[in-house]
Image (cartoon, grey):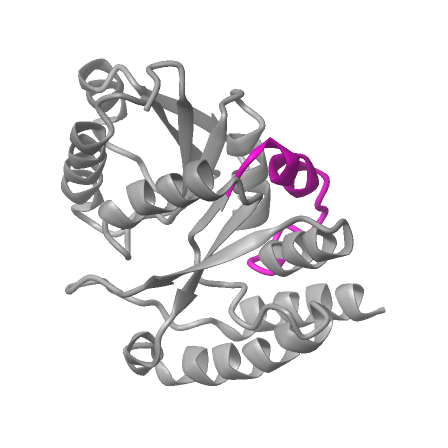
Amino acid sequence: MSFCDKLNVIVPLYNPHDGWEDNFMNSISELKDELKETELTVILVNDGSTIHLNNIEEMTDRFKYLKYFSYPLNKGKGNAIRYGITASEADFYVYTDIDFPFGHQIISQTYNVLKTTKTNIVIGTRDLSYFKTLPFKRRIYSFLLKELNYFITGFKIKDTQAGLKGLDNNARKILSDTKINTFLFELEFLKNSVKQGLSFEFINVSCRPGVKFTNFRVRVIIKELISLLKLLF
């Protein structure tokens, strides 16, 4: 593994739960220890949080490989990921959620798949045990979306919404050109990637203990359905 290898890890942030800082700092510290021979940059993107975020300056002072970006209005996860993934160039990119729901080791594993297989995209796929932990409305929504994903991506990819993806620079270009700002930006990204003939590998992800899931509000579901209709038509 060369010291010139550059990995950017993008983490969107919006109104996180109390105590998020400790888990976040522990996760990126452990990730840095695992990737000693890699030039790691963690890019934290504040997607217009409406609550005050403590300790940001302290974190950026402590972790020199942490970059923090913020903008005033909430635009959606898709916008935050695009912002982060185009903020700084690297050899490879991985994005995950602020609570590191699948742990930090899956990130180094995803990075290793990108490096050793020369694939364009690594797609996290969730097992049945993950879906059993979801609130009821999210479980139904996720099940229906998985079936639609399979159809929209030409019967190639079912689980597009796991919240963990690894990309090379060819995939980064396609992601940066997506338009959807809601969670369905991932479906748009993977649909376009399949259309462009990019290669992909799957990696199984499992939820770590203690992760808190929120239930989707009706307004969020309606926005997602509008985004889905745009993809279909």
Q: Position of residue 47 (x, y in %)?
A: 48, 39
Q: Is 11 located above or below residue 200 in the figure?
A: above
Classify residue 120 as left or right of residue 208.
Answer: right
Residue at position x 58%, y 37% in the image:
82
Front residue of this view, candidates 89 and 11? 89
Q: Which residues are magenta?
A: 167-184
124, above or below 32, in the image: below
- Image quadrant in which you'd find residue 53: top left
- 174 within the magenta span: yes
Residue 2 is inside the magenta segment: no
Tell me residue 219's x, y (percent): 57, 69
Q: Is residue 76 visible?
A: no
Depth check, front residue: 202 or 9: 202
Residue 219 shown left or right of residue 22 in the figure: right
**For the image shown, how many numbered marks are present on the structure?**
0
Residue at the image position 42 percent from the left and 39 percent from the top: 116
> Is residue 170 rendered to the left or right of residue 3?
right
Res 73 seen here: yes
Q: Position of residue 187 (x, y in %)?
A: 63, 61
Q: In the rendered view, tell whether residue 31 sits above or below residue 156.
A: above
Give the camera-side residue of 121 and 104: 121
Residue drawn at x 20%, y 49% as measured from the top left = 18
The image position of residue 223, as x and y in percent, is 64, 65
Q: Is residue 221 left or right of residue 164?
A: right
Q: Nearer the viewer, residue 172 or 186?
A: 172
Q: Quadrant of the N terminus?
A: top left
Q: Quadrant of the C terminus?
A: bottom right
Q: Residue at x 55, y 36 (%)?
A: 168
